[in-house]
Image (cartoon, helix red, strand yellow):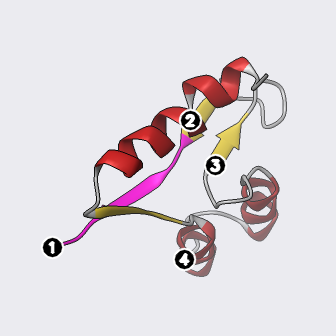
């Protein structure tokens, strides 16, 4: 049985994307790299964020890991 986090996050997005044929998920790896390159996030912070990426490139922050609340962030692109 999937954990509650997956049911609240990944599975919801998967269902939405299965119904939205004109949308796709974009990995956040390149976005994190851009933040580091532009000096918005330090190299160490970029590595920490990358360590929190799911297998498909979504960001899953857990309480206590980065001294933050829990967040699930996924970038979805809609195309024509």
Residue depth check, mark 3 versus mark 1: number of the one nearer the observer: 1
Please, is residue 34 above or below residue 25 in the view? below
Nearer-N-terminus badge (2/1): 2
Furthest toward the left, the residue is 80
| Residues marked 3 and 2 touching at CB (< 8 Å) | no
Residue 80 disc label: 1
Does the magenta stretch mainly form a helix, a strand or a loop?
strand
Q: Nearer the viewer, residue 51 or 80?
A: 80
Read off the magenta span: 73-80
Alpha carbon separation for disc pair 3 and 1: 26 Å
Please, is residue 21 above or below residue 30 in the view? above
Nearer-N-terminus badge (4/3): 4
Residue depth check, mark 4 versus mark 2: number of the one nearer the observer: 2
Residue under label 4: 34
**SS state under label 1:** loop
Residue depth check, mark 3 versus mark 2: number of the one nearer the observer: 2
Residue 11 disc label: 2
Nearer-N-terminus badge (3/2): 2
Nearer-N-terminus badge (3/1): 3
Alpha carbon separation for disc pair 1 and 4: 26 Å
Residue under label 3: 59
Q: Position of residue 9 (x, y in %)?
A: 56, 32
Please give the name of the residue rendered at 60% of the width and 32% of the height, measured from the top-left corner.
71
Quadrant holding the C terminus: bottom left
Residue depth check, mark 4 versus mark 3: number of the one nearer the observer: 3
**SS state under label 2:** helix
Alpha carbon separation for disc pair 4 and 3: 15 Å
């Amino acid at each position: 049985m999937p954990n509650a986090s997956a049911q609240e996050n990944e599975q919801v997005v998967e269902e939405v994307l299965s119904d939205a044929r004109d949308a796709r998920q974009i990995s956040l790896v390149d976005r994190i790299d851009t933040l580091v390159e532009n000096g918005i996030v330090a190299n160490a912070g970029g590595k920490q964020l990358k360590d929190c990426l799911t297998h498909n490139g979504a960001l899953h922050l857990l309480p206590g890991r980065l001294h933050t609340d829990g967040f699930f962030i996924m970038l979805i692109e809609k195309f024509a």
